[in-house]
Amino acid sequence: MNIIKPQKIFFGEKDLQQLMIIKALVKQKNILTEVIGCPTIREQNGLAKSSRNQHLSQTDREHCGVIYKQLLDFKNLYKKMDLNELKNQIITNITCSKKIKVEYLELIKLDNFQSVEAHHHNIKYAVCIAVSVSGIRLIDNIIL
């Protein structure tokens, strides 16, 4: 960025950790480039587009639509339910297909990526998930 000096750079929210690291680096180094997060591009069923998707069978791709649906459910319910109960419910709903194994499902503070056990007002969060489908690791998230 110091060589090219772009006014703006764009990173996808799909790789949220990468986006947040770049934003922090730009701020820390006082770089005058605006970092813009772009929404995750999704398949018709909600599966986040990824080069890894090509390794999934058509059936696996269809099953993976449940991941985004459950992230949306998390977004709608996290202020209304106990967080541990909600996480267990979401994981159960995702893994009922038997083909999807959840590695983690976490509510994190967006500014520092720390996992939290409860939400508070005026703090930005994201819900992040990693799953394994037929041996293929997929990640996804929604900024809340």
Image (cartoon, helix red, strand yellow):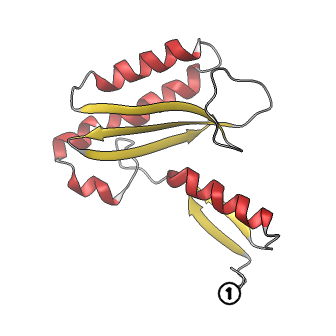
Of the 4 image quadrants, the one containing the C terminus is: top right
Depth check: give the residue in front, 23 or 28.
28
Where residue 69 appears, as percent x and y from the top left, is 42, 31
Residue in view at x 40 percent, y 48 percent: 48
Q: Does residue 19 appear to the left or right of 24 in the view shown? A: left
User: Is residue 139 shown to the viewer in this render?
Assistant: yes
Q: Does residue 27 appear to the left or right of 129 in the view shown? A: right
User: Is residue 144 shown to the viewer in this render?
Assistant: no
Mark 1 falls on what kind of element? loop
Q: Does residue 41 appear to the left or right of 102 in the view shown? A: right
Residue in view at x 20 percent, y 41 percent: 134
Image-quadrant location for residue 54 = bottom left
Q: Which residue is mark 1?
A: 4
Where residue 103 appears, as percent x and y from the top left, is 38, 34
Question: Is 94 drawn above or below residue 144 in the view shown?
Answer: above
Number of numbered discs visible in the structure rendering: 1
Of the 4 image quadrants, the one containing the N terminus is: bottom right
Residue in view at x 70 percent, y 73 percent: 8
Depth check: give the residue in front, 9 or 27.
27
Task: Sort mark 1 into few (<14), some (14-19) or many (20+) by Cα contacts within 10 Å.
Answer: few
Mark 1: amino acid: Ile
Of all residues, the one furthest to the bottom in this rendering is 3
Question: Is 3 drawn above or below residue 38 in the view shown?
Answer: below
Image-quadrant location for residue 112 = top right
Image-quadrant location for residue 46 = top left
Where residue 15 appears, as percent x and y from the top left, is 51, 54
Residue in view at x 72 percent, y 58 percent: 24
